[in-house]
Amino acid sequence: MSHTDTAGTPRARGHSSLPARIFSRDHKVIAKQYLGLSLFMLTAGGCLAMLMRWQLAFPERPLHWMAHIAPGGMPGGVMVPEFYNSLFTMHGTIMIFFAIMPLLIGAFGNFLVPLQIGARDMSFPTLNMLSFWTAALAAVVILSSFLATGGAPQSGWTSYVPLSVIAPPGQNLWLGALLLSGVSSVLGAINFIATVINRRAPGMRFFRMPLTTWAMFIDSILILFAIPVLSAALILLLCDRLLHTNFFLPAGEIISGEAMKNAGGGQPLLWQHLFWFFGHPEVYILILPAMGMVSDIISCFARKPIFGYRAMVYALWAIAGLGFIVWGHHMFQSGMNPYLGTAFMISTMVIAVPSGVKVFNWLATLWRGRIELSAAMLNALGFIAMFVIGGISGIFLAATPVDIYLHDTYFVVAHIHYVLFGGSLFGVFAGLYFWYPKMFGRQMSERLGKIHFWLTFVFFNGVMFPMHLLGLKGMPRRIYDYTQYSFLKGLQPLNIFMTVCAWALGLAQFILIFNFFRSMRKGHRAGNNPWHATSLEWQTSSPPPKENFAAVPVVCRGAYEYSLPGMEADFLPQNAASPPGSSSS
Amino acid sequence: MSLRSRLPKLLAGAAIIMTPALVGGDPLPALFRLPEEASTYAPRIDHLFHLIAWITGVIFVLVEGALVIFVVRFRARNRKEAAYLPGNNRLELIWTAVPLLILAFLAILSQKSWAYIKEQFPVQGVRVDILAEQFDWNIRYPGPDGKFDTPDDILTVNQMHIPVGVPVIVRLHSKDVIHSFFLPEFRIKQDVVPGLTTHLWFEARRTGHFEIACTQFCGLGHYRMRGYLTVETPRQFQAWLAQTAAQETRKAAP
């Protein structure tokens, strides 16, 4: 990559006071705040997973140094079941609500959407600032639950009732944190929708928007419809816990030999319906932005237009729409009417189609390209490769009879990790390597980036792929000590292998952390457009000035004009005047 | 291109891997195999599982193979310039329609077995009532009068006995939180929800000892909510029932 140094790059930071900088209303600053917060939470969530893996490899073997860090959860270094239950609950909750979601939407969405549509900022900058600080408060609340009496929440990230109604007080903090995070997400979603509809630069028609922006836009609509349902369910659960309202508790509940006095009139499956009505769109909320970013990156490093741009947009809409009618596939074995199971099986099979369309279009984009394997591209390709596995395992689970066996086993855990780590997180890594120069004005080390990718890729598969096999053997998820069962005892060697990979996977992330911080000072200066990309964010300085563009760009074409025939350069920016003799629309 | 020269080798390799499958042996190492099939419908589920594995396996190889081949073949160092190909509607149509057809086929097959297992309960069979609680399975047989919740009911905790070759119809309910009744070798799993009665049925193909696992996270002792299933001949089963009933009467009248 060439380094066309832009003399006099205006720097965003400047003369404002400290509070003004902390409570910034600039979408780029807010994006970086989200990035910092969510990367921190990602690290925390990862550490929880590694502890969990220790117990799975060596059940009840002491980890002496942990006795000092978590004396209650691991007295003498030996993990107690309550602590293990908290670990998987908090791992899931933190990763989904406080790492992946804010990384994709809070950090990349905030940074990229205004830049890609040629806006000076979001529609509601103050609201944007409030979204971040609400998310930060939610993060504090969820972390503080580790200090609650009775320990951190331990009902699973799905917090099924009645277990979550009778859980220790940490559950209240879990509910509070998710409510706050929901408020933050909805405020953000409103802002994105308004921004994309109203603030597009002249000439930026909807069907000229880069797929990243499309994905963030559709994602925001998903958030707007899905999160309020979760919030309603959370409030009902909070009422059940604090006011004994019994929305979810049926009559005749006997907990540890004692009849619950007030129970009656509630329905435990109501929680599952509400939770998964949110929960399944949520899975797509966590993957669509990554799909958008990967599309932009693949196109750029294949030096080819994204194949089937409109089909890609329609596929995003299809996934978003269908995503709302598949929730029952989480409940095939719940006791729900089996006829309903049939309906949800069909809708679930159908939603595989638009996901497949995206994969085929990515492949077609690569075909006859001129592929440069940068760190960003490697991660984007990793995304495709792993998302395919996650999609395929989804078909096993969608087939209702097969799900009878695989439901609630490690096969499901494998599936979710191939989608959310193999998919979303590789997408995040790709985005990080790709847009870091735009965010910080300097490039990350490509060499370290590639090493980080390969180690992550190998160890990710080392820990996650065998989960399919555990599932095949019937190993249930959320189980503190599977060696209690004689049919699972033989799985310990495999679990040890997975744990070694998990710890190696964790250690490999230090390369990213090192690269991330070192490059801020020592990275090569990026210049405006280090990757020779077409979309608008690359047509301003790195990092962009306070209001993004010296003059509002006028958009002349779509975002994927790479390798246009008959042109000297192999890319044509969206706002560049048409080359003589060509008429592109 | 070297790809073409490597193709015969790749094909030969694939053939070697697949030979055992073609001649009927089990191609999979033990780690990849499902547990034994102890219920009559376990083979149906496994058949569907293997069919999906084959279909998606082929798709997996094609897609990941294309990915790797494209990346190697079209690397910048081998190429002067990229082609300008913004899309092709016919291709979009093909790769929308073909997966749709495959998935429709799988959906129809799934529905057949799903209906068989979940909707077509046998009329005759041994009836068992299971009350789940943190962290035990209370197992109840109707006794000589054939009715539940009468004084002659036979109760056991975590010890389930059933006869081989006879359908077993189980009624499940829970005292406290949600549990899930899982018999891996029988490919049966059913959540047990307080306030709701759920049902399942299965028929054992052979006698033996098996474990019952709880697969819906139910709290502190979830991991040790284990039961035992003994499948025996109908005669042994009747003897066990009588013996258990006698023990209970002895306990009740000291």
Image (cartoon, coloured by chain):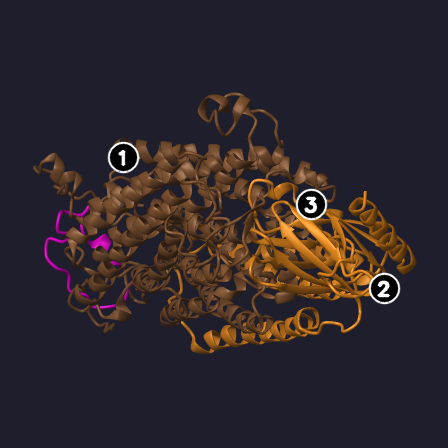
- Of discs 3 and 1, which sits in the foreground? 3
Colour assigned to chain B in the rendering is: orange
Front in this rendered view, residue A138 or B56: A138
Please report the bounds of the magenta region as a residue range.
A535-560
Q: Position of residue A135 (x, y in %)?
A: 28, 46
Q: Amino acid at mark 2?
A: Gly
In the image, taking residue A455 as reference, residue B147 lies left or right, namely right
- Badge 1 amino acid: Met
Q: Foreground residue, A194 or A113?
A: A194
Q: Please, what secondary structure does the residue beneath circle 2 have?
A: loop
Crowdedness of circle 3 by 10 Å Cα count: few (<14), some, many (20+)?
many
> Which residue position holds label 1?
A520
Tell me the element at label 1.
helix
Is B197 in the magenta? no
Q: Earlier in the sequence, mark 2 or mark 3?
A: 2
* C-alpha gap between disc 3 and disc 1: 54 Å
Quadrant of the rendered structure where residue A576 is? bottom left
Task: Give the chain letter at badge 2.
Answer: B
Q: How many marks?
A: 3
Left or right, B125 with respect to A361, comes to right
- Disc 3 residue type (three-letter): Arg
Image vertical order of residue B63 relative to residue A471, above or below: below
Q: Quadrant of residue B1?
A: bottom right
Q: Are marks 3 and 1 on the same chain?
A: no
Disc 3 sits on a residue from what chain?
Answer: B
Residue B165 tag number: 2
Determine if residue B161 is in view. Answer: yes
Q: Which color was chain A given?
A: brown
